[in-house]
Image (cartoon, rainbow, N blue to C red):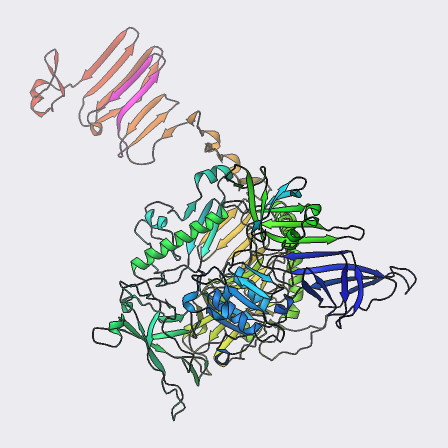
Amino acid sequence: MILKIYNPKGELILDTRDFTYSGASMGEKTISTTLYSAHKLGITPNCYVDFRNERYVIRSEPSIKRSASTGSTGDAFQTTVTFTSKQYELVDCDFMDYVLGDDMYYTGMDSFSFSGDVYDLCRRIQANLNELKTNRWIILMPVKNSDTPQPVEEIGWSDRILEGETLQISVSNENCWNALTRANSDFGFFFYLDTSLKHIYVGVEYPEFKVGDELITLEYGKGKGLYEIQRDVEVNTVITKLRVKGSNRNIDQNYLRTEKFPRFTQNLQLPSFRQTLSQSRPVDYILAPQSTIDYFGLRPGNKTFDDIYPSITGMKDGKGNPIDEILAIDEIKDGMNDKNELEQSHFYVYLYDLGFDLNKFTTSEEPTMSMKTGYCGGIEFKIREILPVTSGQTYYTNGCRWKFLLEKDTSSSSNYAIPSGKIKPQKGDKFVLLNILMPENFVLQAEQRLKEAAQKYLSENSQSKVSYTVNLDEIYFANRTLVAAVLKEAVSLRVIDNELGDMVANDGSKYTVKSIQNLVITYKEGQDIPSYQVTLADKIVSGRLDRIESQVNNVVVNNIHNSTQNEEMIRSAVQNSRNLRELATKIFDSEGYFESNSIRPNTIDTQFLSVGAKSSDFTTNRITMKVYKENNTFKVSLSAGYINHRALWWGGGGTLPTDINKFTWAINNTLIQVLPDNNKDYYIYVKADRNSHLATWFVSTVKIQTDEDRSYYHLLLGVIYPEQDNRRDISTVNGMAYLSGGSIYGDIIKSVNYAENGTNEGSMYDLNNGNIRIGNEKKGLLFDSLSKRFNLNGIDIGLKNELGELVSHLNGDTGAAMFGKGSQIFNADGSFSLAGGNILWDLINGLNVTGKFESQKNGDRILINPTSRAITYMTSKNQIVGHWSFFDAGSIIQLFHRPSDFQVDETQINGNNISFNIKNTNSNFSLSARVGIQGAKFDIKNFPTKDRLASLEVGEFYRDGDIIKMKIS
């Protein structure tokens, strides 16, 4: 094939037979070529080529390499050119704050936020695309009761069929293409472009690989369409045990807290957690089917569903009315009165039966109605009054049972309020209630929703993520031009392969159906037909036009990270060092105070040095910041928490407030935001209300000064760096550091190679909270003052005396321990040695004690004396009541009725004779015995006689003349 290159006027410049087409589904489509010439070619931006019924244009100056003087050789100039498809018209169209049919009621700014579903997103994109001067693009989406997608600007509320979440979207300096990728990255719907028709299909199934009505099937072998197929599996992605939790919104502090389970549970839990509270560790996870576990093993994973919490979303009353929709709204007056005050500062909305009295479930925070859809989507109204609607009152017959008095929102300006004009809630607008404690039935339903979401997530992630790289038979496609013409990105390709297929046909053959993720067509000089290579994938993710990631490179990087900890440490140190050097160029003067010139080296000589700014002099509490990658898209997650400022406060006034709480702002909501541009810095601000303790997150590429907004402080907390080595890092910039004499005052000390992950071995010391990390979660020291947790992970601890002798040792891997230079040893198998080896225990030989044994120091006790070969039982009064002596010839057991009245002399051993003496301590009675091989002799003195019978107890002996008798009654 000959590729003809034209200049912007349509004049032919030259042609080539050596070029490559590369296309990605939901990504970039380009044609690249390298041209060799004796002279510099007249190739400029807007030169173009036509390929497969589509025009591709040069967007930037070509790359030129000169290797010889002009005209000296035919390849003196080497020009590398890339032509791009029409989809770049979407890149050239800014995504502004416009909505179809309502442009005059929106800001028209490039930094804004809105709330809505995927249809609302596409309507906003279409509103901006309509501004293009060229033939406009049309977004088509599925509708109810039709198999044909319709233009989004013609789809009404009741026609929407795609089920999805309503999300809060924050936008900052985006183009329409990057906004379009949100349909995939934020809402999970595929899209594809028909650039020849300038149609954009969102949420529509990918087309099948067909010519007319004929389904094309490819198979390995000559004349069957493909000659090589490679099956690739994404590593470390399978989960078979998923630990799950929901949001912490609308959760009571005593949620699931019982006497047996007194711990605080801040997040929504699975139903199984509630059912197993009696266990020491309630079940907070779900498992894949046993057959899957048998195949893969137990592979743990974690997932937090921040969008699932007890709410009225999706609930209906007894008559089927949606209780999360507004039924009606009172007429609203606009304007100001003579005192330059709002003529109307509050308004009523009417709601269906919520099923509970909201007055009984409020918290210390102000109850809030947050609008999710409609003109006021994303706006929060304070609820000032909650009133029941009874029979005979307005809208009662329409199903109304509650009316709320809402306060107008004046956050944007003191003399402009919302609702105003057309921007007001309307019947059918969706909302959620915040800062309330939901009744038990709503909590149970939320737990069930969490379970269902977890099961869906586990189902998608408990199997290998498979892709196929297929080399197609060029002769097959050369002989089938119509088939070659429909081979495009995103089409569903059916490949029959009895060895690598993952599906079974009716005839027993195996096949796979995957969508084309990447298509490469290569044309070479001297070859009549091109070569084809496609990559097939289960789940295709959208790509940004400014950077398309390679799946193969991702796998390689993951392998390196998993196997080479030292390289990861070096990488973190290099990256963080580079970040810190660059941080000087990224930090800006948020207060307009400091000199703009940098201080030259070797010129600082001072008695006091402060680093930071008044606005940055704050600390955070319970706030976590994380940047992660999901489906090739970077996102930032910011948690709820508090900031404690040391120089600014809310509530106004020029003097320092005595109420210390005025220095604290609360951030009640988490934020998960896509970072659409991988090449830009993003700034993380705490948007703190000047008149209240409430604050929200704001992430933007724009540098905002702290006092720029009269209603809010924009407190700069951190900077997110552009992508580097497949990651985006965060540096915090809050806090102050002071150097005075020999003292350093500050907030946090970090090593250069420190990173917020479980494998990095850097160190961190939080001077305010006392938190310490040295090393990592596998080998390191961790101290968390908030949870009062001190961990030494995988570390051997040794104690030496002044002479350098090891006196104690603890093995961090096995738990084995040694103390007192080896006099006490505890082994990992449970065996031990104490008292220098005199007390031993192991599983086979049991307990072995050398020397005297005494069961306890005080009280009734048993004594074992190996030297005298005796066992003695002694009372708490140190009186012997039993004595068992052991000899070569036998043993003697001595038992005494009244131990307090008797004294037992030490048993004597003399040759073959054994003797002992017992005497009464209160009389002259005594018993002497001598036992030998010749017999036994007893000598009894003052033995009780018959005249003392009355004083004897039953069982005692007495002498009646020459006869020994016992009293029996």
Where residue 470 appears, as percent x and y from the top left, is 65, 46
Relative vertical location of residue 14 with respect to residue 210 in this rendering, above or below: below
Residue closest to the eye, 696 or 594: 696
Q: Residue at x 22, y 73 (%)?
A: 390
Where residue 348 appears, as percent x and y from the top left, is 32, 78
Residue closest to the eye, 157 or 554: 157
Relative vertical location of residue 786 with respect to residue 436 in this rendering, above or below: above
Answer whether residue 888 is magenta in the image.
Answer: yes
Where residue 785 appears, as percent x and y from the top left, is 46, 57
Occupied quadrant, residue 877: top left
Relative vertical location of residue 790 with respect to residue 149 in this rendering, above or below: above
In which quadrant is the C terminus drawn? top left
Relative vertical location of residue 841 with respect to residue 411 in this rendering, above or below: above
Residue closest to the eye, 48 or 270: 48
Q: Is residue 348 left or right of residue 847?
A: left
Q: Residue at x 57, y 72 (%)?
A: 129
Q: Which residues are magenta?
A: 876-897
Q: Is residue 408 left or right of residue 901?
A: right
Answer whether residue 217 is magenta in the image.
Answer: no
Occupied quadrant, residue 47: bottom right
Is residue 557 at least partly visible in the picture?
Answer: no
Residue closest to the eye, 681 or 277: 681
Where residue 206 appears, as percent x and y from the top left, is 55, 55
Is residue 875 at least partly visible in the picture?
Answer: yes
How would you classify the magenta stretch by its main secondary structure? strand
Q: Is residue 917 left or right of residue 664?
A: left
Identify the residue at the far top of this view: 934
Q: Residue at x 90, y 65 (%)?
A: 70
Occupied quadrant, residue 765: bottom right
In which quadrant is the N terminus drawn? bottom right
Identify the residue at the far right of this view: 72
Give the number of marks: 0
